[in-house]
Image (cartoon, grey):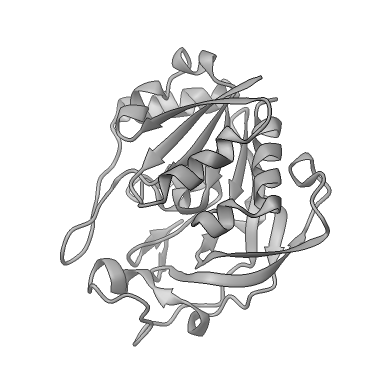
């Protein structure tokens, strides 16, 4: 039996359908802790109880009219997190978790990319805010023979939200690619939503073509990291391939 810490909060989601994914997962016992309380469990000592951390959270962002506030985690928390990674604790990051801690640059390095709610600087370069598109039915292809993709067909279909975001392609091992066209006309501006209150708008917004990677692995410190861009809503939660990928990811990072 694998024990996982499931970390949530910061972004809305339909709770029971999401929890059902873990309830129906064989050989997994899960504990839910929401942010910011979960931060107290990001330590080497607390992690002894867990084989893996699954992060479906989005810390460090406070949404308000006129634009979000971005807060940086404490130095104590940063060091505890990095100590966890040096100790080999495995992490699975899901969907909107890639937008977390926008004021902490190293968090993007840990995950392998960043979803930007507002235009910003990433790796010393100015970047446009990221794009989103709900309910996209697209074909996913397996990009690598890997324990995380074990048992997954070479190509499968899923209906889910997609991101036009920043991926550090040179630093990650690709697992999954989408056949969707990752260009700005196929997405909506994140800043238009959080700053201007305009959903489903890309008026006056432009973004360079983006990566079609929607799943990858990497190592940070001594830890195995998996990011899966899938997992927005109950339609995606119910997808058999998503569930298998998530179970495989938990198993693989648990062996860090």
- 149 vs 54: above or below: below
Find residue 11 and report its horizontal and vertical position in percent: 35, 51
User: Which part of the image, by quadrant, shows the C terminus?
Assistant: top right
Find residue 198 and report its horizontal and vertical position in percent: 27, 76
What residue appears at the point 35 percent right and 62 percent down from the top-left corner? Answer: 117
- 11 vs 254: above or below: below
Q: In the current view of this chain or complex, which residue is farthest to the left? A: 65
What residue appears at the point 38 percent right and 69 percent down from the top-left corner? Answer: 129
Quarter of the image for residue 130 reads bottom left
> Is 79 or 197 nearer to us in this picture?
197
> Is 213 or 28 nearer to us in this picture?
28
User: Which part of the image, by quadrant, shows the N terminus?
Assistant: top right
**Is residue 172 shown to the viewer in this render?**
no
Query: As drawn, is 177 to the left or to the right of 233?
Result: right
Total marks shown come to: 0
Find residue 98 and report its horizontal and vertical position in percent: 47, 51
Find residue 69 and report its horizontal and vertical position in percent: 21, 54
- 184 vs 40: above or below: below
What residue appears at the point 30 percent right and 36 percent down from the top-left corner? Answer: 73
What residue appears at the point 69 percent right and 73 percent down from the top-left corner? Answer: 179
**Is residue 43 shown to the viewer in this render?**
yes
Quarter of the image for residue 26 reads top right
- 135 vs 256: above or below: below
> Is 233 or 255 nearer to us in this picture?
233
């Amino acid at each position: 039996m694998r024990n996982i810490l499931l970390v949530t909060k910061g972004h809305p989601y339909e709770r029971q359908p999401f929890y059902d994914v873990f309830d129906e997962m064989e050989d997994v016992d899960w504990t839910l802790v929401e942010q910011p309380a979960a931060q107290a469990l990001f330590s080497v000592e607390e992690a002894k109880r867990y084989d893996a951390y699954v992060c479906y959270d989005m810390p460090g962002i406070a949404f308000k009219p006129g634009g979000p506030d971005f807060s940086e985690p404490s130095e104590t928390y940063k060091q505890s997190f990095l100590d966890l990674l040096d100790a080999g604790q495995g992490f699975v990051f899901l969907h909107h978790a890639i937008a977390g801690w926008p004021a902490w640059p190293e968090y993007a390095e840990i995950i392998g990319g960043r979803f930007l709610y507002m235009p910003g600087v990433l790796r010393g370069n100015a970047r446009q805010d990221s794009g989103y598109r709900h309910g996209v039915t697209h074909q996913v292809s397996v990009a690598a023979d890997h324990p995380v993709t074990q048992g997954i067909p070479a190509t499968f279909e899923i209906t889910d939200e997609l991101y036009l975001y920043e991926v550090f392609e040179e630093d990650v091992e690709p697992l999954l690619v989408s056949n969707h066209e990752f260009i700005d006309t196929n997405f909506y501006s994140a800043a238009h939503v959080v700053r201007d209150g305009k959903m489903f708008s890309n008026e006056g917004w432009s973004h360079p073509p983006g990566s079609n990677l929607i799943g990858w692995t990497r190592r940070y410190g001594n830890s195995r990291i998996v990011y899966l861009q899938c997992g927005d809503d109950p339609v995606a939660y119910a997808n058999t391939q998503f569930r298998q990928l998530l179970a495989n990811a938990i198993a693989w990072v648990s062996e860090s």
